[in-house]
Image (cartoon, rainbow, N blue to C red):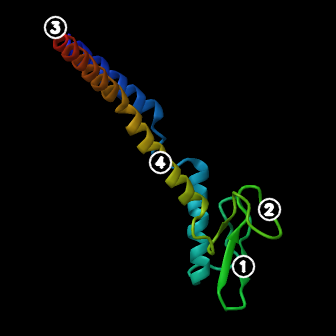
Amino acid sequence: MIIVRFILLSVLSVLIFLLGMPNVEQGRLESRNARAFQLAQQIQTGELSADTVDPWGQKFEIQHTPSNVTVVTSHGSNGASPADDYDADDISTSMSNPPHKRMKTRKQIQMFAALALSLSPWLISYLLRMRKRHAVQQGSESY
């Protein structure tokens, strides 16, 4: 009985982990976002020319701030940005957390959650065993 329980808990844990685990390879959008950020940084440092196009075939926007800092921006897959800020698909060298890094963070959180959830059958089994043991001890003390 113990072996069967162990096998069932193992299979359930692996199944939960595999179903909850994110794709470890970069998706198309994540790859393009990472490439656009890399290109923008290379344009900013002067390694690439200013007429380089982003992965969506659009030219990068280059701005010079009053503090003499060059900001290179790709308008992302939709090719447009709001006048006052960036939208969700924009990539800029001024961003501390560009889209591809946010995707990576989300995948790491999803991986941790899948791992934690895959341990839950073991925890539930342990708690049920402790509850049963406690009930048996309470029953033997009442005699």
Q: CA distance from mark 4 to mark 2?
A: 30 Å
Location of residue 74 with respect to 7 vertically, above or below: below
**Dot 1: element:** strand
- Crowd tier of the residue under label 4, counting other residues whose Cα lies within 10 Å: few below 14, some 14–19, many 20 or above: some
Residue 91: assigned label: none
Q: Is residue 125 above or below residue 63?
A: above
Q: Are marks 1 and 2 in contact (CB under 8 Å)?
A: no
Q: Nearer the viewer, residue 112 or 50?
A: 112
Between discs 3 and 4, the one toward the N terminus: 4
Point out the frontmost of discs 1 and 3.
Answer: 3
- Is residue 141 rendered to the left or right of residue 13? left
Mark 1 lies on residue: 62
Q: Which residue is mark 2?
A: 80
Residue drawn at (35%, 27%) of the image: 13
Which residue corresponds to mark 4? 109
Front of the two marks 1 and 4: 4
> Where is 11 relative to 71, above or below?
above
State the quadrant of the N terminus.
top left
Residue visible at 42% across and 28% down in the picture: 16
The amino acid type of the residue labelled 2 equals: Ala
